[in-house]
Amino acid sequence: MVPIKKSASEAEIEGVSEPYALASLELHPGRTVVTVGRGPGAVAFGGSRVPVVAGPCAVESWEQLEAVARAAKAAGARLLRGGAFKPRSSPYTFQGLGEEGLKLLARARELTGLPVVTEVMSPDAVGLVAEYADCLQIGARNMQNYDLLRALGSAGKPVLLKRALSGTIEELLMSAEYVLAAGNPDVILCERGIRTFERATRNTLDLSAVPVLKELTHLPVLVDPSHGTGKRSLVPAMALAAIAAGADGLLLEVHPDPARARSDGPQSLTPAGLEALLPRLAAVAAAVGREV
């Protein structure tokens, strides 16, 4: 039998000890910087800045989204987040506005200049969401949706990959590997809290995941303290701690009237709360040699 000659890249990957060769720091010793958006409004993750991504859990109306987008821009956030498609535990709760929500997000981008990140839930929706969004989010429930991860390899847009509720760090990196192996090098990881026995918070925000991931991967790492705690009062403290731990960015949920929010109101900051938090984040970032 004639032996099959392997390429240099295949040989290199075979020699890597981790099962996530492309995501591994071992094969890619330099830090990856992922740029979201184009032109003067483009935002880099993984560099010296720690950008803040702010917006509502779900896009509910133009009035709601406009208010949050303007507040986010004024406070100093660099990206606008908002769910057009919402995976919910109950089929009877608000599932999002769908394509109409995507159109509202694009309209908000035109108004503020903020690039948009929103969730995609299925492989057949990747093309539609990519038409409107600057960054495609994979929610915690879909971290191991391998067909979706493969589809994002050809999306042509950066991918924000959230850790699953019970996902290990290794599983998160192997999910990222699916996107990378499918041809998309622009992957951003996100720690958003994991499910534990603790009930004082919605989830347990695993901030130790940030320095651990920094030792294992070259990909940027974000933290979502809104889902990580589920309580508005706890979000500022954990956001500050995330920057101190080395996070490359933050995802913060903001709503103009959290008591009336159709999704995740208890964990959403008010616009005033976001405005008050940004200078504190900038101070901590400066203390660790970075800026917001």
Image: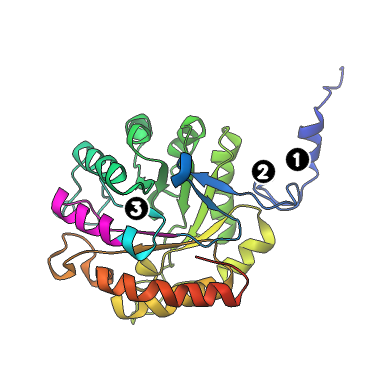
Range of the magenta residues? 52-71
Residue identifier under label 2: 22
Check if mark 2's residue and mark 1's residue have beta carbons within 8 Å: yes
Q: Nearer the viewer, mark 3 or mark 2?
A: 3
Say which mark, if any, is on residue 13.
Answer: 1
Marks 2/1: CA–CA distance:
8 Å
The N terminus lies in quadrant: top right
Q: Earlier in the sequence, mark 3 or mark 2?
A: 2
- Nearer the viewer's eye, disc 3 or disc 1? 3
Q: Which residue is mark 3?
A: 80
* Residue under the image location 43 percent in, 67 percent down: 193
Point out the frontmost of discs 2 and 1. Answer: 2
Disc 2 marks which amino acid? Answer: Leu
- Compared across the picture, whether 31 is left or right of 146 comes to right
Residue 59, x across and y down, in percent: 22, 51
Q: Is residue 61 among what the camera can see?
A: no
Tell me which numbered mark, 3 or 1, is placed earlier along the sequence. Answer: 1
Q: Is residue 65 magenta?
A: yes
